[in-house]
Image (spheres, grey):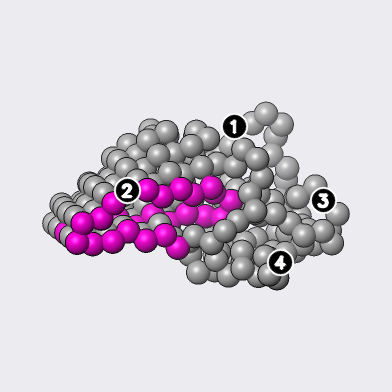
């Protein structure tokens, strides 16, 4: 539930709150994987409160003060490293992210997918070093993204559209150092399209 009149436009934060409730419901066994994927698609594509409300209408409200299920089922231990040497290494699905995460890719590559990650801090700093390789970072809507670093005989790219974020939105700072390689920070196509559709005309 967004707590807003049904015909008002919803924000990225509204969509993310509903998405988090859906992920918890799937973890509780109330939704199948297929139902979760279908409802998440609709949640991130929602434009008004009436689009979001049906997605959680058949789910019970979480108990007041209860710890989010994601914190209990994300593995318990915060991930701090991802290393890919002449191969691949990925962080996907449900996992705990603390304040810092370091990634090293040497003649290899990997992906850090934050869409289902549990961000336990207000800001996550990701440092990537790649040599003849690279690491892609996938972010969900509702995250304030900052990128820095440099590339030698390679390139680092950012493919995250502008967002109208509320004060205090969670923040991810990616610092990528690439030598004969490169890293990308991006958002999945369906999430970008939802943001572009919700943006007012110029």
Per the image, is 197 magenta?
Answer: no
Mark 1 vs mark 2, foreground winner is 2
Characterize the local packing of mark 2: few (<14), some (14-19) or many (20 or more) Cα atoms within 10 angstroms. Answer: few
Query: Which residue is painted at 41% across and 50% down in the image?
Result: 147
Of callouts 1 and 3, which one flags the residue occurring earlier in the amino acid sequence?
3
Coordinates of residue 9 in the picture (x, y in percent): 77, 60
Residue bearing mark 1: 67
**Based on the displayed image, in which of its 4 quarters is residue 54 positioned?**
bottom right
Identify which residue, 162 or 84, lies in the foreground. Answer: 162
Q: Are marks 2 and 3 in contact (CB under 8 Å)?
A: no
Which of these two is toward me, 182 or 119?
182
The stretch of residues the image draws in magenta is 132-159
* Mark earlier in primary sequence (4, 2): 2
Q: Is 121 drawn above or below residue 30 in the view shown?
A: above
Mark in the foreground, 4 or 1: 4
Nearer mark to the viewer, of 1 and 3 = 3
Comes first in the chain, label 4 or label 1: 1
Report the number of discs: 4
**Dot in front, 2 or 3:** 2
Say what secondary structure mark 4 lies in.
loop
The residue tagged 3 is 4
Secondary structure found at label 3 = loop
> Of callouts 1 and 2, which one flags the residue occurring earlier in the amino acid sequence?
1
Per the picture, the main secondary structure of the magenta-coloured stretch is: strand
Q: CA distance from mark 1 to mark 2?
A: 36 Å
Does the residue at mark 1 contact the one at mark 2 (Cβ under 8 Å)?
no
Instruction: Give the residue number, with chain letter if any, for mark 2.
Output: 149
Label 4 belongs to which residue? 200
């Amino acid at each position: 539930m967004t707590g807003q009149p049904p015909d008002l436009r919803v924000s990225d934060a509204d969509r993310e709150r509903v998405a988090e409730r859906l992920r918890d419901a799937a973890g509780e066994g109330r939704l199948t994987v297929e139902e979760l994927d279908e409802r998440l698609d609709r949640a991130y594509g929602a434009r008004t409160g009436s689009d979001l409300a049906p997605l959680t209408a058949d789910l019970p409200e979480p108990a007041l003060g209860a710890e989010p299920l994601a914190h209990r089922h994300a593995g318990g231990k915060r991930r701090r490293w991802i290393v890919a040497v002449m191969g691949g290494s990925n962080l996907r699905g449900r996992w705990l992210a603390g304040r810092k995460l370091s990634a090293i890719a040497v003649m290899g590559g990997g992906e850090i997918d934050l869409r289902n990650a549990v961000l336990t801090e207000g800001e996550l700093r990701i440092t990537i070093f790649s040599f003849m390789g690279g690491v892609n970072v996938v972010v969900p809507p509702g995250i304030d993204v900052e990128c820095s670093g440099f590339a030698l005989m390679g390139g680092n790219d950012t493919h995250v559209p502008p967002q109208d974020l509320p004060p205090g939105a969670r923040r991810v700072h990616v610092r990528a150092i690439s030598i004969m390689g490169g890293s990308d920070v991006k958002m999945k196509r369906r999430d970008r399209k939802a943001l572009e559709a919700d943006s007012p005309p110029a």
